[in-house]
Image (cartoon, helix red, strand yellow):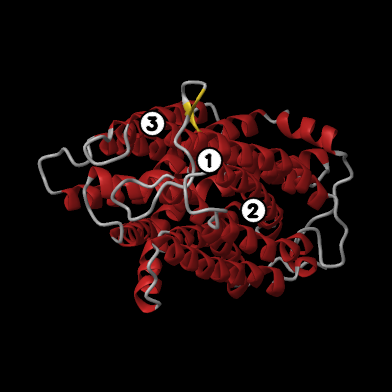
């Protein structure tokens, strides 16, 4: 017998899983370009050759795309596998337990190149470790997210649980952004000569914290007790066909792809925007992230209230437009007639509302789409729905990081920064496209 009352303490435990995998994924998202192709004023050296491929792409863009695309095609497989699972601990928990430790190990290995010089062997090492990291993390993330519509059974409950998740996610971003600050502590306390050693110690420390939080929902939530679900009987091809036949879902996925591509332009570029465009120290990165998170947290109650009163679609549309304006702001960073510190703080404060709403509402919307589909077809395909979502998310992340890395060819250093500024232009275009696509989404009746 399923207990439909999901206690507050377990909602917090569930959000801890998001905090854990957010730390790991965002360490890679925030630090990968900065670690392998650092700006000249970072104290680090380039670890892979800055070569141009096909006249457009640099090597880091190709590497990150290869790792992410391999993982993206793995998503539907793991989603379908968990949908059809009949394990004693449930459909999702066994996957989460098995994948937490490998996710930590391969996250750390991404930042351990074979040599401390710009060598092609580092490029091959990065391809391998990225693939292994993304596959391990996916094996946790897809089943984890598929639990959400099974644990929350009304629209308001889904928004509430998604809010807890988003708190975990943004706290993970803050912690992952503190790599350089933690590296400073290691470098001073251990008297490390090489900056790269200090960064590696910091990455391993944060990865260990991430895996600790990933284990909390897997160990403390009883899937058999709290989930209302049945294993799917469909094989992957008919299940995929049913999933993509949902027009609302197609609009959702297209908008999500554009949003995550834009988001990862910001994530990959934050340290560059701070140190190159604004001429400020990299240690301010964690303070800026904490400020943005703090501001976004203030909006969480308002977003929950507005979602209940006016629906989710209008809030999402407004947030896309606001985020487009923020990208335009990035183009002019360091050139406006007030201090660089004021400029960068203005940017992160303005980003608070759209990042909060676009973090909370889309998972709740998708949970409703999956739930309505199960009612219509009689097949529980939550894992596959979230797998396809994360397929689109990873494509967005891949192209976002790849676009950022490619644009660095046109300037990423003080006095030669056109490539960094062009990211603002492309990000704004992507957000407008996301708003236009999502305008066709038909919102479900509130209940």
Q: Residues within 10 Å of mark 1 (few under 14, many from 20)?
A: many
**Residue 94 or residue 253, whichever sits in front:** 94
Q: Secondary structure at mark 3?
A: helix
Residue situated furthest top in the rendering: 55
Q: Is residue 366 above or below residue 345?
A: above
> Sequence-wise, which precedes: disc 3 or disc 2?
2
Q: Given contact means CB atoms under 8 Å apart, are the residues at marks 3 and 1 in contact?
A: no
Residue 115 drawn above or below residue 416: below
Residue 217, image x and y in percent?
A: 66, 69
Quadrant for the N terminus in the image: bottom right
Q: Nearer the viewer, mark 3 or mark 1?
A: 3
Secondary structure, mark 1, is helix
Residue at numbered disc 3:
409
Task: Please tell me whether mark 1 or mark 2 is closer to you in this view.
Answer: 2
Give me the residue at 57% from left, 31% from top: 254
Query: Quick check: marks 3 and 2 in contact, CB under 8 Å?
Result: no
List the residue tagged with mark 2. 133
The one of 371 and 30 positioned closer to us in this rendering: 30
Q: Is residue 104 left or right of residue 171?
A: right
Residue where numbered disc 1 is placed: 397
């Amino acid at each position: 017998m399923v207990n439909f009352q999901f206690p507050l303490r377990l909602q917090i435990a569930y959000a801890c899983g998001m905090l854990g995998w957010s730390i790991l994924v965002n360490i890679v998202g925030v630090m990968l370009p900065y670690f392998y192709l650092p700006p000249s004023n970072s104290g680090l050296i380039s670890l892979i050759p800055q070569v141009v491929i096909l006249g457009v792409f640099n090597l880091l863009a190709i590497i990150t795309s290869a790792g992410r695309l391999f993982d993206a095609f793995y998503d539907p497989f793991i989603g379908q596998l968990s949908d059809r699972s009949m394990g004693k601990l449930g459909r999702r928990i066994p996957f989460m337990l098995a994948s937490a430790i490998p996710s930590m190990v391969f996250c750390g290995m991404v930042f351990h190149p074979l040599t401390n010089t710009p060598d092609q062997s580092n490029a091959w090492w990065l391809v391998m470790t990225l693939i292994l990291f993304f596959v391990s993390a996916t094996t946790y993330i897809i089943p984890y997210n598929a639990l959400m519509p099974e644990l929350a059974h009304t629209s308001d409950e889904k928004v509430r649980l998604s809010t807890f998740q988003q708190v975990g996610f943004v706290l993970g971003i803050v912690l992952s952004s503190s790599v350089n600050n933690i590296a400073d502590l290691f470098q001073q306390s251990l008297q490390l000569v090489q900056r790269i050693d200090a960064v590696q110690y910091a990455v391993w420390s944060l990865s260990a914290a991430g895996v600790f939080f990933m284990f909390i929902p897997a160990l403390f939530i009883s899937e058999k007790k709290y989930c209302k679900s049945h294993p799917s009987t469909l094989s992957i091809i008919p299940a995929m066909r049913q999933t993509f036949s949902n027009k609302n879902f197609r609009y959702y996925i297209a908008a999500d792809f554009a949003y995550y591509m834009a988001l990862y332009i910001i994530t990959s570029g934050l340290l560059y925007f701070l140190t190159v465009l604004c001429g400020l120290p990299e240690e301010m990165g964690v303070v800026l992230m904490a400020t943005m998170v703090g501001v976004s947290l203030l909006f969480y109650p308002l977003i929950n209230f507005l979602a209940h009163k006016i629906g989710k679609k209008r809030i999402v549309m407004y947030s896309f437009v606001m985020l487009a304006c923020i990208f335009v702001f990035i183009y002019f960073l360091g050139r406006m007639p007030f201090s660089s510190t004021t400029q960068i703080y203005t940017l992160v404060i303005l980003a608070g509302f759209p990042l909060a709403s676009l973090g909370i509402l889309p998972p709740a919307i998708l949970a409703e789409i999956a739930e309505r589909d199960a009612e219509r077809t009689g097949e529980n395909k939550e894992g596959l729905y979230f797998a396809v979502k994360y397929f689109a998310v990873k494509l967005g992340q891949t192209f976002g990081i790849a676009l950022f890395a490619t644009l660095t060819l046109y300037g990423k250093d003080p006095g030669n920064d056109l490539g960094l500024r062009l990211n603002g232009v492309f990000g704004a275009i992507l957000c407008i496209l996301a708003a236009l696509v999502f305008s066709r989404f038909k919102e479900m009746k509130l209940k």
